[in-house]
Image (tube, grey):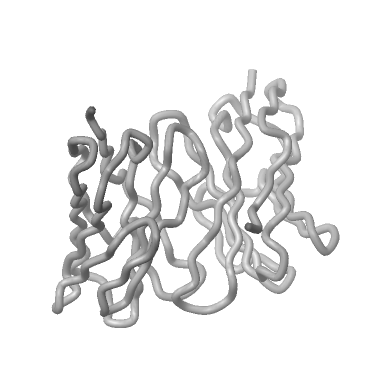
Amino acid sequence: DAKTTQPPSMDCAEGRAANLPCNHSTISGNEYVYWYRQIHSQGPQYIIHGLKNNETNEMASLIITEDRKSSTLILPHATLRDTAVYYCTAGYNNNDMRFGAGTRLTVKP
Amino acid sequence: EPEVTQTPSHQVTQMGQEVILRCVPISNHLYFYWYRQILGQKVEFLVSFYNNEISEKSEIFDDQFSVERPDGSNFTLKIRSTKLEDSAMYFCASSWVGPGNEQFFGPGTRLTVL
């Protein structure tokens, strides 16, 4: 089963920052937090991951709380094409990543 | 940019028939995975494969399923006797070995069992 919990849905206005929360209060100290998204029925797309420090790449930023019990994925300027289901997952080795239901983000014009 | 590819994109089969879904993982990746997603449901882990053997499998991956890496590039999922409930999207993924390595997913094969 997934080790994370996310709100089932969120809306965001186009051009605004989308902040997607994730709770992972039970993950262990060496488990990474990963974010993926799935647009329609396409394959999940990797976005970003982190362990303790905040991370940023060309797609998004990941803010992990100091106690590592939760994190937030930030899409700084959401576009209509960012409408998707966003999955927060956690894992350490190659075998233990599992997907939950995710958050369905709808970006509205 | 390297990517995972899957064939066919859509497979239609009769119940009881065998199907083979094919995947070409990213070159130099050593860990391979199959997931499935029934319409409207979450992505479910089926199996992982490393060093030419199954590393881990879920309870979904029963005796009717098998995986193989027949050559240096392909990774296949075989379903021996398909059931109606096997209808789903099947995703292949690959990754480097070790912690902190993200998985890269293919576009999926839509399997329809009639």
Would you identify the image quadrant in which residue B74 lies?
bottom right
Q: Quadrant of residue B68?
A: bottom right
Residue at the spot x=71%, y=49% of the render? B23
Q: Position of residue A42 (x, y in %)?
A: 51, 38
Q: Residue at x 52, y 47 (%)?
A: B60
**Residue that sits furthest to the top in the current view:** B114
Q: Is residue B86 left or right of residue B39?
A: right
Q: Quadrant of the C terminus of chain B?
A: top right
Visible residue check, residue B100: yes
Question: Image point 59% across, 62% down: which residue?
Answer: B48
Q: Position of residue B17 (x, y in %)?
A: 75, 28
Q: Is residue A11 visible?
A: no
Spot occupied by residue A21 in the image (x, y as percentages of width and height)? 18, 55
A55 vs B61, nearest the viewer: A55
Q: Nearer the viewer, residue A61 or B46?
A: A61
The one nearer the camera, B59 or A81, is A81
Where in the figure is residue B33, as x and y percent of width and height?
A: 59, 57
